[in-house]
Each structure stands twice: as structure tokens, then as C-alpha cells.
Image: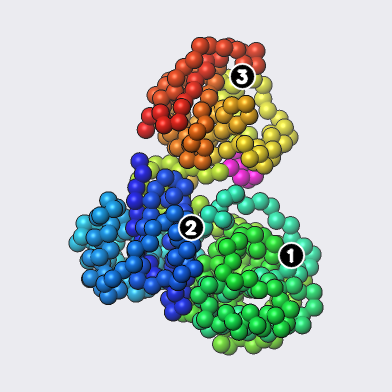
Amino acid sequence: MSHTFVFRVDAGKSIGTGHLMRCLALAQAMRENGHASVFVTASITPSLEGRLTEGKASVFRLTAQPYGVEDAHETATQAKRLGAEWVIVDGYNFGGMYQEALKREGLRILFVDDYGHADHYAADTVLNQNVSAKADLYARRDDATELLLDTRYVLLQRQFRNPPRGERPVPDIASRLLVTMGGSDGMNGTEKVIRALQGLEGIDPTVVIGGANPHQEAVESLCRDVGFSCIINATNMRELMEQADMAISASGTTSYELAYIGVPALTLILANNQVALAEGMAAAGCSINLGWHPQLTQKTIRSAVQELARNRNHREKMATAGRSLVDGDGASRVLMHLTGNSLRLRKARHGDARLLWEWANDAETRSASLSSASIPWEQHQEWIAMRLQDPQTMLLLAFDREDEPMGYIRFETKEETVLSIAVAPGQRGKGHGSDILRSGLQSFFREHPSETMHAYVKEGNDASATLFRKAGFTELPKEEKDGHPVRHFTLQPGTLTT
């Protein structure tokens, strides 16, 4: 079932861009799952509005005075007009009164928060994705308010999640340095960092400036003077991060993106709301907190860069810690909460190889396969490496709300598109197969709306045959495949039984 979600969020030079960018990440996950999103905003830069519309999100300009009861009423009016049940609110100017006003309008609220700034929390759900998140921040909440806390819920944009991250080499000496202070950088930390790095041998900096940066022209000019590469409003941040050996960044959303990719980072604090994040990420071992920007000297920055660049062991530990802290599935977990779905799907990764191998060699799985022989580990490793690199293969794993793996579904397109599905041992007989099949087919058909789906069932596997029939598959005359009698099922686009 598709839904429409309304976001109430602002962005600009004075507000910053982090609130909107993480909402965009959630909106992208919504679109990937067949849902629509609308952004209600009182302030947004043209470049950021373009990012939203490019992602097929609609933008509605607020006419009421922002952040008060009139704002809540106008936002609620738009939500009701669109048939939206949930409003996602993100920003430090929204407090308890705003939440209560939306609640009176009969809407459900997901309130995205960082440090418990509101005087009261009446929202249905509070989301704090930060490493510093804890329930004590929300002691002033309604009894019914649910909490989604910690980095399991970090909202990463599509470019970071798809395709899944791969392995990263760690050079003995780091040379490629990414400098990024977020979308606005009102304190101009970028300039201080550039001056600190000027003339530093062995370091090749790439400076990224956000579209809302009020110092853009001055920073561009300085980069030209010192010979540094400078990129304005980059849309390929994942690529830039993957090319970097290490980074210097503000303590914002970028910290989680760097951690996910596995880029060791030196962080600067540019605002009060970044203190807990900077300290928490440093405590987790994936960054080094250099402290407040105004107190930092160029010498301190320069020395920290030199020391980390030479310390391969430290950088390797930081990369491992970051990748463990942020797994990239946060948006899917939040969306599962909003929709009430019991399962979520994600694309397979190299780290899933052993789990899939164990499932493949389960006795019941082997008996249902055309070949009943056990699969050697080395053969499986080669197989999954090829499947993950093959653009004609979609391999999805299913997880429940507690992140327990429930099974997988695989689509391979050669002469025809054939699916394979398996429920994890210990989870069979609970109805998960139908949910995995339905969700997997919906994901596949969103990307390939004209493909006919085929499934082959070994003679005697009545459970799988029943599963496909209930999903709307048509059974064709029996045939032989790989020397075994099989039942052949097909599904035409648009005929999936939901």
C-alpha cells in the first residue's frame, strides 16, 4: 500500500541545511518503496529546492507566520488535502506547542530531534539518530510517545546506500584529504582549514562548499590562490568520500556519512548543537574531535592532519569503528515504523556471504533445490562476489523490526527473469515467505515495470507452489529443468496479489 508523507522543514544560510538533507534521505527511501512526499517550507534556497524536485518530491511554500499555530494549521491543511497520515517535523524552532497543534488536527507526528530542545514532546514518535541520543532527553514527553534512538536510525541519502558500500584500502600514508564544513558554514571554518593546510607537503586537499555558504566567493578565491581543488554544492559526495584517505569536517550529518563509508575524520565544532555529536563520535573511535572552531589555531589543525596521515593503524581502527556505528539502514528502519510493515528489505552485501551460505546448505533448502549437493564455502564466495557485481542480479535480504534476518529473495535476468526465495531456518511456517515475496516483487517491478517474472519449483515442493499461486502467479505446463521435473510459474506486471 502506498502512502503520502508531509515534511515540515526549513533550510538556508541562517538555519543550515542538515535538517532538510536528512529529511530528503528519508523521502528518497519513501520513493524507493512507492510512497510520495511533500515538503512544506517557509525558507529554502533554490539549489536545495532543486534537489527536492529532482528527487520527485513536491514543494509547498508556507504563507503563514512560521513556527506557530497558524503554521501548524496550514501544514495540517496540506496534509489532509493530500491524504497524508504522518507529518515529519524537523527543526529547532518547532516546540511542544507546534506538536500539540498538529495533534489537534488529527495527524500523526514524527519529530526529528537532536538534543531535547523542545519544552514538551507530544509527537507520536521522536527520532534522534545521534550517537549521543538517550531517553533521558525526552523525560518531558507524553506517555504514548515512542522513541527511535541512536545511530541505527541515521538517515543516509540514496547515493550512500545504493549500491551498498564495498571494502576500502587503507594506505600507509594518507594524502587525499576531503574538507567539508556542511551546507552553510556561517562561521567560515573552511577558510581557517584551508590556511592551515596551505603549503603542507604530501597532502592533496579537495574542498567542498555547500550551496548555502555565505562565504562562497571568498573561499573559491582562496582555493585558487593556494592551488586547492574546490567544488561548489557537490552532488557526488559519496564518490568524493570514497576517493579520500581522510577528512576534515564539521560535526554534523556529514560525520555519519564519513563513518558509513569508513573515512577517518578530524572534526570541528561550529555550533552548540554539534558538541554532543563531536564528543560521541570521538568516543566511538571513528573521529578525532579538534574542538571549537574559534579556539582552534592553524598550527593545531596542521599538526593533527600530519599526525593522522602518518598513522595507518589509527586510521584503520577509525574506519572500522565508523562502519560498525552506521550500517546505512536507518531510513528503512524509520520507514518500517511509519508504515507499520513487519519486514524490510535491503540489498545484499559482502558481509552477508556466510549467512547466505549457511541458509543455502540447510537440509530443507537443499532438498527443495534442483541440486541437493552441499555447496563448498570457496564456491559460494566466488558465486556471491559475481552476483553482487552483476547488474542483472537483484539480491535482497529481509529483516524484522529487531533486525533479525528472515530470508532472502533473488532476481536474475538472462534470457528471462527468474526469482528464487528462501525463508531462514527457524522462521518457516510463520507467514514470512508471503511478505518477502510480495515486498521483493514490488521492489523489482518498481525498477523493471515491464518484465515478466518466472519461478521454477521442484516437483514435490507444494509449499512453494502454493506461495506463488497465492501471489497471483499462473502455472504453466510442467517441464524439465537441469534434468529435474519442475513446475513453471509466471507473473505479469500489474497482476501481483497484494
- The residue located at (63%, 34%) in the rendering is 357
Front position in the image: 389 or 245: 389
Q: Quadrant of residue 369?
A: top right
Q: Nearer the viewer, residue 275 or 489?
A: 489
Horizontally, residue 78 falls left or right of residue 352, namely: left
Residue that carries the numbered disc 3 in the rendered image: 370
458 in magenta: no
Q: Residues within 10 Å of mark 2 (few under 14, many from 20)?
A: few
Q: Which residue is mark 1?
A: 313
Q: Nearer the viewer, mark 1 or mark 2?
A: 2
Look at 31% across and 55% down and name the residue there.
Answer: 86
Secondary structure, mark 1, is helix
Q: At which x and y percent is residue 226? A: 73, 82
**Crowding at mark 3 (Cα within 10 Å: few <14, some 14-19, many 20+):** some
Q: Which residues are magenta?
A: 348-355
Amino acid of disc 2: Glu
* Above-or-below relation of 5 to 210: above
Q: Amino acid at mark 1?
A: Asn
Residue ID for mark 2: 54
- Residue 476's spot in the image, x, y percent? 49, 15
Residue 176: x and y in percent read 73, 68
> Residue at coordinates 43% horizontally, 41% vertically from top-left?
343
Residue 400 appearing in the image: no
Give the answer, above or below, for where 5 lies relative to 70: above
Q: Position of residue 129 (x, y in %)?
A: 45, 62
In the picture, measured across the screen, residue 398 lies left or right of residue 416, that is: left
